Amino acid sequence: MSKKKFKKKGIERAIRKIFERQPDQKYTAKEISAILQITDKNMRKLVLSILKDLKNDKFLNEFQNGYFIINENYSTTFIGTVDSTARGAAYIMVPELNGDIYVQPENLANALHGDTVEVEIIRQKKNKTEGAITKIINRKTTQFVGTLDVRNKFAFLILDNNKINVDLYIPLEKLKGAKSGEKAIGRLTNWPKGVANPFGEIAEVIGMPGNNDTEMLSILFKNEFEIKFPQEVIEAAEKVGMDLDPEEIKKRRDLRNKLTLTIDPFDAKDFDDALSYEVLENGNIEVGVHIADVSHYVRPGTPMDDEAYKRGNSVYLEDRVIPMLPEQLSNMACSLRPNEDKYAFSAVFELNEKGKVIKEWFGKTVIHSDQRFAYEEAQAVIEGKSEVQKEAILGLDKLAKIIRKDRMKNGALSIESEEVSFLINDEGYPTGVVKKTSKDANKLIEEFMLLANKRVALFVGKLPGDKGSNNQFIYRCHDKPSIEKLKTFSVFINKFDYDLEFENIENVAKKINGLLEKIKDTPEYGLIQSMAIRSMAKANYQTNNIGHYGLAFDYYGHFTSPIRRYADLMVHRILQDKLDHRQKSYGNKLNEISEHISAQERKAIDAERESNKYFQAKFLEDKVGEEFEGTVSGLADFGMFVRMNDNYCEGMITMSSLPDDNYYFDNDKFQIVGRQTGYKFNFGDQVKVKVIGVDMFKKQVDLELVE
């Protein structure tokens, strides 16, 4: 920092204090200069300039005769949440402000990522508000995952979370048998003022790094997911039997005589949805969407319900699932397994040949799944390679395609997320990579699940007489994209010689769908589709219905997966209240639930991505020195990311390692450019790379450019 800037900041702080001490007093620039004993002409001009800046920041009000007074409506202190950066600074997210407050490392006052803090604004610029933390109101967590580094007289727990820029100091007597190099959970016990590192103790040893169990548990602990169920929850689950109660069956609609199928991934263990199919005498088709009736077994206020709410959703790592419910329910009692009678919550639709809903019925049922299909088996029927349940599968597929076509015509986005998973052998090593593609069988299930979700939300959410939406419901919402993000997307695709102009939000989906259809057989398709997803808003749960932009639905909720999502369990309960004509008010409780499960969903996504990165690094660990063709998938000021075309794994080439020139990142043009040669690297460029290193601790793959 220059001496001039340092002097200006000091004077600004002094001026703020003068006004804060005398909030009712008016001062001119001349009077402020006198109080500060400033006589130099240029420095007096600086005082006036600072007063004008403070007025623009709304800290001061100015009268016509040049008098300034503190703005009584101006607050300099706010409550917010710490969002740390990997470089040690942080942004404080304050709901009532338009933007975040930036805090430099020296002003963090021992606050950590996720903490709730009190922050005071210390200066404002045109595009940035800067503050200092004055108080830690609540620690997000006091338990952290890391790797132990044991010395002669003390130890440090090197934390996994790169958003926490300190290590935990552990006295030797608080190691509890943990050894150097082991992964462990440390508990923060004390952080004395003026001390660089917090003090802690070991709470639990996880194991040695590099072991799959150790790494997956570390990821789960880091994202604050529980591994084990409490004993009282396990005991409650064990009491749930597989036999249905004859008295309960009498209260339900018996659909066991309807042809019913499940279609799921080949390795699925929990089947939470099934479809029934029947051609009616009038030529219409009756399709039943049958969902596992978790609400029958998991009642509000029970330990089972409390634990399901706490988890929010199941977490799907590469080699394991951490279920929301104990396996006795998720894989046994609730699962719609073939050739077993099961309780279900059903949405039954009568559809005409154009896919329009003629009649609908919602309610509790008992069903019997006649056939279990893997997606591949159902796809074989659609492609004419199998005759198993041919009439039902082809009939459902035909209807699904009609419904999907109408959805696209109404403005839905035709974006399919690309999923890559690993084939893992019995020893826990990834032996191959599988890119999941969505075929007709997948889309068949998707369309009927979307139909049920939409119609349930419409049934419960739409108030009579077009009086808006019922706020006593949990909607799955997806906001419209911002024009700014779409402009960035336009610049991005321009690198591939594609040109899209977004004049208004209404034509966005149509234009993106047209582009994706045009390029679906090109190498850059996956990259552009991924960037299109990033340019959209994130979906979440809320009680204020704003619709679902991506699906082009005015009403949408989650009804179809209560085994793995708490949102769906709540929707089942709310729907049943509506069917029973019970006017139940949750007050603000549904808002709290929506915020919590949205946060849990984001954490689950982070954990799943980190799990994928670990197995990606493990897959390439024995391939150091090998060369691969790849596609430039990301650009930054520190280098570029390349996704290898054969195995879909991603690594990074550092800027300094790029050969034959001194390169820099041009942020405006999204390019890496050579200063001497002018050579440019763009998104989508085809390159040849060599794997030069794999860091299992950072889950990072290092590459160098070959061609």
Image (spheres, rainbow, N blue to C red):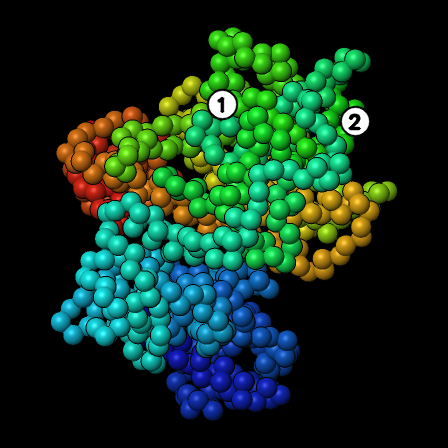
Where 439 sits versus 167, above or below?
A: above
515 over 383 or under it: above or below: below
**Label 1: which secondary element:** helix
| Apparent side of residue 98 relative to residue 14 in the rendered image (left or right) | right
Mark 1 sits on what residue? Answer: 375
Relative horizontal placement of residue 189, taking residue 242 as reference (left or right): left
> Given the image, on which type of amino acid does mark 2 rest?
Lys
> Label 2: few (<14), some or many (≥20) within 10 Å?
few
Please say if 65 is above or below 697. below
The structure residue drawn at horizontal position 46% and vertical position 77%, both measured from the top left corner, is 134
Q: Position of residue 544 (x, y in %)?
A: 69, 51
Q: Nearer the viewer, residue 581 or 223?
A: 581
In the rendered image, which quarter is residue 335 located in?
Answer: top right
Comparing 288 with 146, the one in front is 288
Mark 1 and 2 residues: CB-CB less than 8 Å, in contact? no
Mark number for residue 359? 2
Identity, as a three-letter code, of the amino acid under mark 1 = Tyr
Please rate how many residues cluster around mark 1, counting C-alpha atoms within 10 Å: few if below 14, some from 14 to 19, many from 20. Answer: many
Q: Is residue 287 above or below residue 637?
A: above
Q: Which residue appears at 61% of the width and 43% of the height?
A: 294
Q: Residue furthest right?
A: 465
Residue 462 at least partly seen: no
Residue 203 place in picture, x, y as percent: 33, 66
Q: From this viewpoint, is residue 612 visible?
A: yes
624, 344: nearer the viewer:
344
User: How far separated are the C-alphas under marks 1 and 2?
Assistant: 29 Å
Please tell me whether mark 2 sits on a helix, a strand or a loop: strand
Give residue 117's position: percent from left, percent from top: 48, 71
Q: Is residue 432 left or right of residue 561?
A: left
Does residue 6 appear left or right of residue 299 in this picture? left
Dot 1 or dot 2: first in sequence order is 2
Which circle marks residue 269 in the picture?
Answer: none
